Amino acid sequence: MAEKHWTDQAAIDAWLEWLEGTRGRSKRTVEAYGMAVRRLHEYLQQEGVALLDVDAGQLELFSGLYLHKKGVVARSRIPYISALRGFFAFAQARRMVARNPAAKLSHPKTGMPLPRTISLANAERLMWAPDMGTFIGIRDAAMLALLIGCGPRVSGLVALNESSLRPIQVGNEARLAVVFREKGQKERMLPVPKEADMLLRVYLGHEELKAIDRDIMVKDGQGTHPDRVLFVSVRSTILRPDEHRGEKRRLTRKAVHDMVQRYGRRLGIPLEELHPHAFRHLFGTELTEDDVSLASTQDLMGHADPKSTSIYIRLAQRRKAKLIDQNAPLAKMRTPVSELLKRLPPG
């Protein structure tokens, strides 16, 4: 039996607090899910229906025809469905509702689009774009090297602190590893590629960085301890100089996106390649091109679902070309151009 003392807004607030505090969902996910349920709430208010009194048919109408008419395409409706299913499952468990009206709410069928990636050649051009004679240039080069060399989500990149860098030993060589905390605060530790390792050490030793107050206190399983923001902003248009310190020195996702666009536009790189996630897709594609196993790629990318990793098989064109050239029927027969091909220099 449902308990009647819950208001719609109190139910939403309790669920969002539970998502972030108990389930450890990221602020971005909590904001997106909250927006979805509030949009349903606004729709139901127009219909004269309370959120906690909604039935399955009304949910189907909202998540289907209503959102479609509002211009929300099928793929963009998926987070709405996930949010509604999660909210009403929570509401039923807390006895806010007697039955879960979203229990049979299904995700819309969509094709899996190929992710937008950046070409290896354009990623290399971007690595040469920052001015290495300046502090900002060194900072940007270090960030680009991590984006390209480790494939993090941009949220994981900007969340890095100095303690996220760990010394490791690879044979007789002292190297750095980096710990990314991304979706749901899940951790994954990766060795830093040698090029990014060197750029990070140059950045950390820079005199301008030493003059910046980026001290913070962080809480983890071992308690609260001092740390430092890793990638810092150098100016702020909204903060006074005395306020621009500590956590407020941390670069935002938008700042990284703007940095990629600024360098890329100068180089004439196509706009669709100029987003930070394109480097993550490049990372996954290049691993697949070199026949790294699906399980290893999934581990390196921090994918919970192997289906997220398998998309890169569709992008691995060099690998496909090699398979075709060596194993398809034309590779096993003599053709009018076979001798000519043998005389051509390797491409």
Image: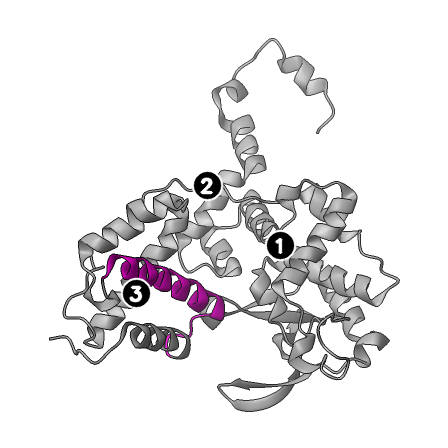
Q: Amino acid at mark 3?
A: Gly
Q: Is residue 218 above or below residue 310?
A: below
Marked residue nearer the N-terminal end (3 or 1): 3
Provide the secondary structure element on which disc 2 rests. loop
Which residue lies under the disc numbered 2?
113
Q: Nearer the viewer, residue 274 or 286?
A: 274
- The answer to whether residue 241 is seen in the rendering is yes
- Residue 316 location, quadrant: top right
- Numbered disc in front, either 3 or 1: 3
- Residue 343 location, quadrant: top right
Which residue lies under the disc numbered 1?
276
Marked residue nearer the N-terminal end (1 or 2): 2
Question: Real-space Cα distance between discs 2 and 3?
Answer: 25 Å
Q: Is residue 344 above or below residue 87?
A: above
- Numbered disc in front, either 2 or 3: 3
Q: Is residue 146 above or below residue 27?
A: above
Q: Nearer the viewer, residue 324 or 255?
A: 255
Marked residue nearer the N-terminal end (2 or 3): 3
Residue 245: give x, y in percent of width and height: 71, 81
Question: How many labels, in total?
Answer: 3
262 relative position to 67: left or right: right
> Is residue 165 highlighted in magenta?
no
Q: Amino acid at mark 1?
A: Pro
Residue span colored magenta: 22-48
| Image disc number at residue 86 | 3
118 relative position to 295: left or right: right
Q: Amino acid at mark 2?
A: Pro
